[in-house]
């Protein structure tokens, strides 16, 4: 991918359709902010999620968990993103607004995942009594 430094500690990147942005299992060096395009989140060969909204933060789980990437990120069309190489401590301490946005995004994704899971359960004959 083509790279251009925009500010200290931020790198603007352009990806072509099909480019791998990050591989599942690799070490994380921060998170990304989508500027334009479409990013697919893959677990193995399965498309688990897509991001198309400019300004959305993605690739943050490995930063929060302090481990390797939890999924493969792939450009599904020409995509531009800003890579921000920060660890969780620096992020929380220095950028509380970004931290809040990440928490909001995670909460929204959890609500969607729970709704999708409930819909899947609704299509099975066996129900779980709570």
Image: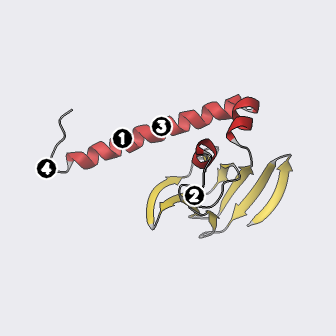
Earlier in the chain: of badge 2 and badge 3, it is: 2
- Secondary structure of the residue carrying numbered label 4: loop
Give the spatial CA distance, label 1 vs label 3: 10 Å
- Characterize the local packing of mark 2: few (<14), some (14-19) or many (20 or more) Cα atoms within 10 angstroms: some
Q: Quadrant of the C terminus?
A: top left
Residue 96 placement (x, y as % from top left): 69, 29
Q: Quadrant of residue 15?
A: bottom right
Earlier in the chain: of badge 4 and badge 3, it is: 3
Give the spatial CA distance, label 1 vs label 2: 23 Å
Give the spatial CA distance, label 4 vs label 3: 28 Å
Q: Which residue is mark 1?
A: 114
Earlier in the chain: of badge 4 and badge 1, it is: 1
Give the spatial CA distance, label 2 vs label 3: 18 Å
Mark 4 vs mark 3: in front = 4
Q: Which residue is mark 2?
A: 38
Give the spatial CA distance, label 4 vs label 2: 36 Å
Earlier in the chain: of badge 1 and badge 3, it is: 3
46 left or right of 99 in image: left
Residue 67 placement (x, y as % from top left): 60, 50
Q: Which residue is mark 3?
A: 108
Earlier in the chain: of badge 4 and badge 2, it is: 2
Count of numbered circles on the image: 4
Mark 2 vs mark 3: in front = 3
Mark 1 vs mark 2: in front = 1
Give the spatial CA distance, label 4 vs label 1: 19 Å
Residue 125's disc number: 4
Q: Residue furthest left?
A: 125
114 left or right of 129 in image: right
């Amino acid at each position: 991918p083509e790279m251009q430094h925009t500010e200290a500690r931020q790198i603007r990147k352009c990806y072509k359709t099909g480019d791998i942005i990050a591989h599942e299992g690799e070490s994380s060096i921060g998170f990304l902010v989508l500027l334009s395009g479409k990013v697919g989140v893959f677990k193995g060969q399965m498309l688990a999620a897509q991001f198309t909204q400019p300004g959305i933060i993605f690739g943050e789980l490995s930063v929060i968990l302090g481990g390797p990437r939890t999924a493969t990120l792939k450009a599904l069309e020409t995509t531009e993103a800003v890579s921000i190489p920060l660890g969780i401590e620096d992020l929380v301490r220095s950028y509380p607004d970004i931290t809040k946005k990440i928490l909001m995004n995670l909460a929204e994704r959890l609500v969607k995942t729970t709704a999708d899971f409930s819909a899947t359960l609704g299509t099975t004959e066996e129900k779980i009594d709570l």
